[in-house]
Image (cartoon, rainbow, N blue to C red):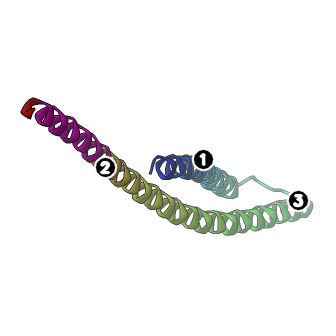
Amino acid sequence: MKEQIDTLRRLAGVRGNRVREMLGRVNYQRGLCQRYRNNITGLNRLCGFVVPTSTALQRGNQQQYKATLFKMLALQQRELEVAEQTLERIQAELLQAMRGEKVLEHVIESRLEQWQAQLARQEQKIQDGLAAQAWWRGQD
């Protein structure tokens, strides 16, 4: 029984490491999503700037600049969507891993209780045997 409990504890340690690793991945992914949101906000601000233009070349440059900004904005929005989907997937995996870890904790607690009960029964048998021996000796 002790070997089972030790094995379960090692398994719990591995699962605990997996949960901590996944928490790190979730935090990283959240940071990535926030960076994309910040980029989108910055690009929107840049798109809002209006610069007076007096020549056709300046107007052409500004149009190209705005077109590039809009392309970058669209790219950042697509990247944000992908990052948010990945975050949702990782969070679901984390939740599943945490549930598995909790189940394993309950199994370990149950096995410990069983083992302690078994040890208590063995101890009681030894005590009963010693008491019976003492009683038999007292009968003589």
> Between marks 3 and 2, how big is the CA–CA gap?
93 Å
Q: Nearer the viewer, mark 3 or mark 2?
A: 2
Q: Nearer the viewer, mark 1 or mark 3?
A: 1
Q: Nearer the viewer, mark 2 or mark 1?
A: 2
Question: Which percent across, then down, holds residue 61?
Answer: 88, 60
What residue sits right under mark 3 in the picture? 55
> Between marks 2 and 1, how big is the CA–CA gap?
41 Å
> Between marks 1 and 3, how big is the CA–CA gap?
53 Å
Name which residue type carries label 3. Thr
Stretch of the chain drawn in magenta: 118-137
| Circle 1 residues within 10 Å: few <14, some 14–19, many ≥20 | few
Element type where label 3 sits in the image: loop
Question: Which percent across, then down, holds residue 39?
Answer: 67, 52
Q: How many marks?
A: 3
What residue sits right under mark 2 in the picture? 118
Whether the magenta-drawn stretch holds residue 84 is answered as no
Name which residue type carries label 1. Gly
- Name the disc covering residue 24, or none: 1
| Circle 2 residues within 10 Å: few <14, some 14–19, many ≥20 | few
Name which residue type carries label 2. Gln
**Front one among 10 and 40:** 10
Q: Main secondary structure of the magenta part?
A: helix
In the image, residue 112 sits, relative to residue 60, either above or below, namely: above
User: In terms of image quadrants, where is residue 139?
Assistant: top left
